[in-house]
Image (spheres, coloured by chain):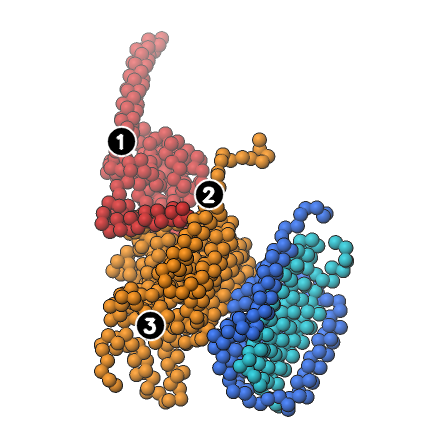
Amino acid sequence: MSFAFYLIVALTLAGGLAAVLLRNTVHCALALTVAFAGLALLFLGLDAQFAGFAQILVYIGAVAILVVFAILLTRSSEAEQEGVFSKSWLVGLVIAAGVFAVLGWAVLASARALPWQAAAPIVTVRDIGNVLVGRYVLPLEIVALLLTAATIGAVIVALHEKERTR
Amino acid sequence: MAATPISVTIDQIFILFRDWLVHFLPVAVRPFAAVVLGVIAIACVFPGLFALTTVFERKGLGRMQNRLGPNRVGPFGFFQPIADGIKALTKEDVIPFRADAVVHFIAPLVLVVAVFMGFAVLPMGRNMVLVDMDSGLLFFFAMGASTELSVFMAGWSSRNKYSILGAMRAVGQMISYEVPLLLSSVSVVMIAGSLSLTKIVEAQNHYTGIFPHWYVFTPWGFAAFLMFSIAATAETNRSPFDLPEGESELVAGYFTEYSGFKFALFFLGEYLGMFSISGLGATLFLGGWSAPLSFLNVIPSWIWFFSKVMAAIFIFIWMRGTLPRLRQDQLMNFAWKFVLPFTLLNLVVTALWRFMGEGWARWVVCTAILALAYVLMGRTGMHRKKIGPRSYRYAE
Amino acid sequence: MVVASPLAAYLLVAALLFAIGLAGALTRRNAILVLIGIELMLNAANLNFIAFWRYGPHPEALTGMMFAIFSIAVAAAEAAVGLGLVISIYRHARTTDLDQMNRMKG
Amino acid sequence: MLGEGIIKGMLETAKNFAGSFVSEERLTTVEYPEQRIPTAENARVFPFLVYDGPDWQAGLRCVACQICEKECPPKCIYIEKSKDKKPDFVGKPQIYPAKFDIDISVCMSCQICVEVCPFEAIKMDTQFELATDDRFGGLLMDRQQLAKSNEYYHSIHPTEATEVDARLAQEKVAAEAKAKAAAQAAAAKAAAAKAETPATGGH
């Protein structure tokens, strides 16, 4: 585990923490992109170039932008009068801590069984493409259908509501 | 070393120079040093090109409008960028009182860094690529997508309604035109069978007789190139798609509240974006560093790459001198109702081209489909609205 | 504490990120921030997939990688629909505060 | 067809671009400090004070009536009257401005002072290169800076100045005639009085 790994992990976790803790919603979204970028770097560290760049392209280029657009369209960036955390925040925190405890225990308990070393797999984009349209062609088609449906659905959901209620 | 022709030596002169510099260092750090030298070269060449372009742009625009353009600083005004640089550096760096200082500071840096990253995968000559990545095209677009966020950061952190309006327009426009930009590049990937930009150039570096096999000389390639150019112009916020930074209505849009060095950084970012997207367009459709006619290969490859980039820049400037700015609704309509459907159709045509095999039949069929679609879409979707005398809803 | 293998380190990071996302999703009032928490959880899962693919016995089968790529695509769709819903709710109720959205009747 | 207009426009600019290198008359730019277009005769920038004769202090037409000061919309004129009097162009003793300042950073070049001046003493100048690095003192013009000779006035607005001169000459003639008439009347009166005095004195 190199110094770079710890640096990237620190960046990712700091971004994630800031994304859920900061008061200003736009700052949260920007911190989220820091976390996404850190994750993309972790993917690159795991020799998954394609996934890393796809992560940057989709998350930073599209999802983060969608989030900030939503924030601005719903005026969430204006300061809240009441607290930013929900009334049941303690319960949520306990649940999250419990989940982390279980997961961490599972990882640590099985740490000995985990593989130590693995040769870096040589994966070209051609291989990924071949697998995508070969073995995984059905999921690919389903995802394509899902994306189309989601696009249409998002447009319909966010279309201007008719002036009939209130 | 065997005797190599002088043209090959000149072609590879930068590589040879780099290797000569690196061989003084211990073997362990050589690859690293080579990359650092490449980064330094990119970081020097493109800002220099930016300085040259600004003065050429101003002079060229002047000529198009029957003016002289800048001609005071130095011979024919060629030292104008130096004067501009000194001015930008010595200006006061104003940060608005209500602005979000940290985000306001980071935004131009994010922009310039993200734009610079894109140059890493562009092959600027034979063997002249910083990182020959297997998924280079994806990397390029990932970096291009990151610039949108910096635009938003700049506009939002300024706490200025013109800035935020400009930023929302810019982000909306960049997202809308990124889709056709990506899809028109995908048609090249479909034929070349690789995301690596060096492989894409090599796939085009063949000649029939003296004529090159550039993708722009195929029906699908020409259509994709056209759509790519439109989308690239919109991506770099250049006229006629310069609505987000329209000086006349938004006072430079998202970077209204920037001054001095940070303003210069935004300016630099915009021009570097133009260079990188022109370089990508040249690589994908115009054969990258390959010569336009086979016997011109004696001229070094990097000269061809940079002359293609500068020709693209000239067309950018020419369009800026000619076309008026689009309105927001026209911009979006154009993206979603014309450019995107046409690119999607072009993908189908590309697949057809791929599977029809060699022969004249695919030329006829593909050209016919694309030309027909172009005419029909132009007739139906983009016709001019009939504008009658103005009617008033309440006043009569 | 000494982490046994690189895989364990990645899994721990993913677990921590998942917990952070879960905590965010469960404790924030703003609907958009809940979505941000969910995105973080999805990303943590992706990191797990990639890590298992990298250190797994058959990386050439690309299973974990494919799962991550599909998950990225699905997450994009989820974000689009989720944010569309938030905007629609905001139009209707003039708030994105989840504590105030406690009626089933519009 | 779609894109036709774009190509047409691009050709137009290309024609301009190429043409500007070939034919010089296309370029409309005047390179200012070296080349100058002669100013139009009716050009006006800031007001100045006209004086007759060689000495500016003696020949100043202004009589410090302060009409311009009162009429000036942005109130950029400041006048102090003199205590003593000096003869004007007719020869009549008049007070003169001991102080006459115009703040040209405030002046809006409306020419109202010129319109209202009954003595043709204030006119509009064509001098526009007044930039200075001292924005308070440098742009506040005093009496001496504002005084320009009638010859100068003739050189910048010849037609107008000739008219003014004619009018002034006419006025002078009229004034002289009036003075003569008054003098004659006075003389006649005096003569009559003289003629009468002995009579009355004869009592």
Which residue shows up at 53% across the image and 81% down it? C60
Image quadrant holding the C terminus of chain D, namely: top left
Q: Is residue B313 visible?
A: no
Q: Quadrant of residue C22?
A: bottom right
**Front of the two marks 2 and 1:** 2
Above or below for C14 versus B388: below
Residue C10 position, x and y percent, is 59, 82
**Front of the two marks 1 and 3:** 3
Residue B9 position, x and y percent, is 25, 77
Q: Which amino acid, by three-letter code, is at mark 1?
A: Thr
Q: Which amino acid, by three-letter code, is at mark 2?
A: Arg
Which residue shows up at 26% across the image and 43% down it? D37
Residue D176 position, x and y percent, is 28, 22
Q: Colour of chain B?
A: orange
Q: Colour of chain A?
A: blue
- Whole-angstrom CA distance, mark 1 to mark 3, is 71 Å
- Whole-angstrom CA distance, mark 3 to mark 2, is 45 Å
Circles 2 and 1 on the same chain: no
Which residue shows up at 45% across the image and 59% down it? B349
Q: Quadrant of residue B190?
A: bottom left
For disc 2, the marked residue is: B384
Q: Mark 3 belongs to which subunit?
A: B
Q: The chain coloured cyan carries which letter?
A: C
Nearer to me, B98 or D164 = B98
Which residue shows up at 33% across the image and 32% down it? D120
For disc 3, the marked residue is: B125
Q: The chain coloured red carries which letter?
A: D
Q: Which mark is residue D159?
A: 1
Q: Residues within 10 Å of mark 3 (few under 14, many from 20)?
A: many
Indicate the secondary structure of the residue bearing disc 1.
helix
